[in-house]
Image (cartoon, helix red, strand yellow):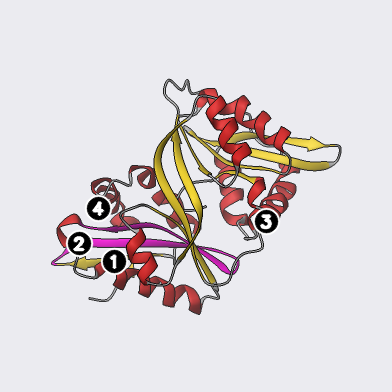
Amino acid sequence: MIPCALTGSDLPAATDLLARVGLAGARAMLHRYLRWQPDGVWKLDLDGALAGMVTVLRQGSVGFVGCMAVDPARQGAGLGRRLLEHAHREARRAGIVTFLLEATPAGELLYRRLGYVVEHESMIFARPGATAAAAPTFAAADRRDIVALDREATGCDRAVMIASLIDEFGGAVIRDGERLAAYAVVAGDRLGPVIASTAASGRALVERFAPGCATAVASLANPAAVAALTASGFTEASPLRRMRLGPPIAARPGWIWTLASPGAG
């Protein structure tokens, strides 16, 4: 039982598996992960059927783990560990030094056994009654500054993901003179990522786009972000824990207002 690459032809079975293990949000993002990192998506087949899967997005020297799923009928047999250890080996060969992930309560024990440590608590927030509205498209002139601000905030090179998101979805930026202070992407009904170097700019973007969004993921270590989301009608829905394997990342957690998704950071 050796994990192998998951490809486009596996997407129907993979999205079905994600739904069965309760990772509904990941279903909408999986095809994007495959596009951003086609050599970072692995599966394990047993008896001719998909038994498990995992993704690792390479963001410079950081690998963000997501879509960790094992068929409920196959759980408890060590398949999740086998998949993740394989993903670690392959990612390290490609230069990954540190792994990050957002752990669900169900997955946390496995990650601890593999050496992951908790960095902070996170939360999936939900907002009932969202009324979807088209967000403005991004100006081409903002692209370089968005990528640079994102790198300074997260400590990761997420240029491929960010460029794809701002090409596909709308959002907005806030500038302080010539300097980019903040940006927000509205990805369907999800508010995020939102990166803001000041509390005022982060709060302004959340307030602007919250009415059209049904979900957002934020670190509870950023109280300004949590307060802005709560004031805009979001409520806590599902707890997560940010976990790390490897050296810490030089990031600015207070600038990270919402994530792109639990599987991408």
* Amino acid at the residue labelled 2: Gln
Q: Looking at the image, is mark 3 or mark 4 earlier in the sequence? A: 4
Q: Is residue 97 above or below residue 54?
A: below
Which mark, by number, is residue 151?
Answer: 3
For the residue pair 22 and 116, the one nearer the viewer reads as 116
| Other-residue count near label 3 (Cα within 10 Å), few / some / many at <14 / 14–19 / ≥20 | some
Residue holding disc 1 = 80
- The answer to the question of whether label 1 and label 2 lie on touching residues, with beta carbons closer than 8 A, is yes
Q: Looking at the image, is mark 2 or mark 3 earlier in the sequence? A: 2
- The answer to the question of whether label 3 and label 4 lie on touching residues, with beta carbons closer than 8 A, is no
Residue holding disc 2 = 75
For the residue pair 11 and 65, the one nearer the viewer reads as 65
For the residue pair 149 and 165, the one nearer the viewer reads as 149
Q: CA gap, disc 1 to disc 2?
A: 8 Å
Q: Which residue corresponds to the image point at 46% horizontal and 22% vertical from the top-left?
A: 130
Q: Does residue 6 appear in the picture of this structure?
A: no
* Amino acid at the residue labelled 1: Gly
Q: Is residue 54 above or below residue 208?
A: below
* Amino acid at the residue labelled 3: Arg
> Disc 1 on helix, strand or loop?
helix
Count of residue discs: 4
Q: Which residue corresponds to the image point at 43% horizontal and 57% vertical from the top-left?
A: 34
Q: Looking at the image, is mark 3 or mark 1 earlier in the sequence? A: 1
